[in-house]
Image (spheres, coloured by chain):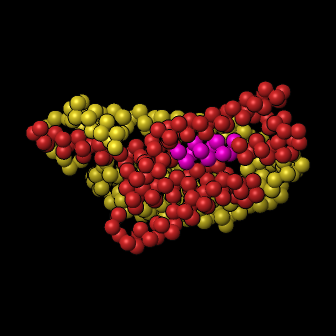
Amino acid sequence: MRNNGILRILARFLIPLILLVGLYIQFHGEYSPGGGFQAGLVFSAGWILFVLIYGLERGLRAIPLKVMYALSAAGVLIYALTGLVGVLLGGRFLEFSDLLTNPQSAQQAGIIIVEFGVGLTVATVAMLLFTLFARRRRQWDDALSDEDDPT
Amino acid sequence: MVAVAVVRVRDLFAAAMLFAIYSLLSAGLFTVLDAGDVALTEAAVGAGLSTILVLAVLTLARRHEHPTGGHNWLALAVVLVTGAMLGYAAMDLPEFGAPDNPAQLHVGAHYVANTGPDMGIPNMVAAVLASYRSIDTMGEAFVIFAAALAVFSLLSVRPHRDLPGVRRRRPISRRRWRKSSTDRKSS
């Protein structure tokens, strides 16, 4: 697909747009439909489109596999630690009202932080699943072609 | 009609595409019902990600379903009876959007009344998901993370059977597999 001009031009136009829409869904989630889950998926869809057009190597150069592992765990950790911070400040687990002095803005801050954690996890997990499946076929082909060689 | 086509078609690639269309149609249905968040999720998950994952899996499997002979009458009977019962039960459902629906009477009213004063944000779905039912959402995030771990551990195992269409005498040896996976990691 790398040599198809129409796809390349379209992707060059679409990928930034998709990533931007993902971020918009993420950070505008309290005002319009959306949230971390959908935003993560849309964001990862942009990356997957990049991989489909430009190949897995270049996609992994943009976001290496190790970074994906780390970020997918970090997203869940952000969520849980936000809950624990609330406990340390004297509230209950995942009760955001004590994070800031004004309970309303504290709630908003808490929602934004945990939604960011969800978005991070979902985006990286979606990329990870796609990479693992795509790489599996490649590994298989490599192992087979290696075995065909007498060396 | 699309659902029938998904079941009938034997080409798995076409089935995956039809299933994406089915998801997109459901997303449109949710939009008509004013459920923007659900519609967005359905479009992103059903039509987007799951289709891509199915296509990725299809690179590892045959393109066509194995033809199976005969009909499974028991399965047809179970589906028909369940469908008839669901249809019968649906006649007892309250009218869509009626103010005295059970859905409108319990905790929903509390959320609708308190989201504004508590948080000052207009999207009540976000408020319920991230704040009122925060622990549920955390569990969800952990489930997604666990799914990634499960797929990683399953796909790290050396295959014991051949790719479809490849005829070889023995499975890939351990040394070859390890070599090919480490090559991939370094590049």
Image height of B169 relative to B29, above or below: above
Q: Nearer the viewer, residue B163 or A102?
A: A102
Is residue A118 located in the magenta-colored stretch of the structure? Answer: yes
Instruction: Give how far across and how far down residue B4 sits, in percent.
Output: 44, 62
* Horizontal relation, residue A98 to residue B58: left or right: right
* Horizontal relation, residue A104 to residue B161: left or right: right
Is residue A31 located in the magenta-colored stretch of the structure? Answer: no
Instruction: Give how far across and how far down residue B95 sits, in percent.
Output: 75, 60
Q: Which quadrant of the figure contains the C terminus of chain A? A: top left
- Magenta highlight range: A114-124
Extreme-bottom residue of the structure: A6
- Residue shown at the point (78%, 52%) measured from the top left: B124
Q: Which quadrant of the figure contains the N terminus of chain A? A: bottom left
- Residue shown at the point (40%, 53%) measured from the top left: A58
Q: Which of B64 and B176 is in front in this view?
A: B176
* Horizontal relation, residue A122 to residue B179: left or right: right
Image height of A139 relative to B41, above or below: above
Instruction: Give how far across and how far down residue A125 sits, in percent.
Output: 51, 43
Q: What is the letter of the red chain?
A: A
Q: What is the letter of the yellow chain?
A: B
Residue B60 in view (yes/no): yes
- Residue shown at the point (62%, 64%) measured from the top left: B29
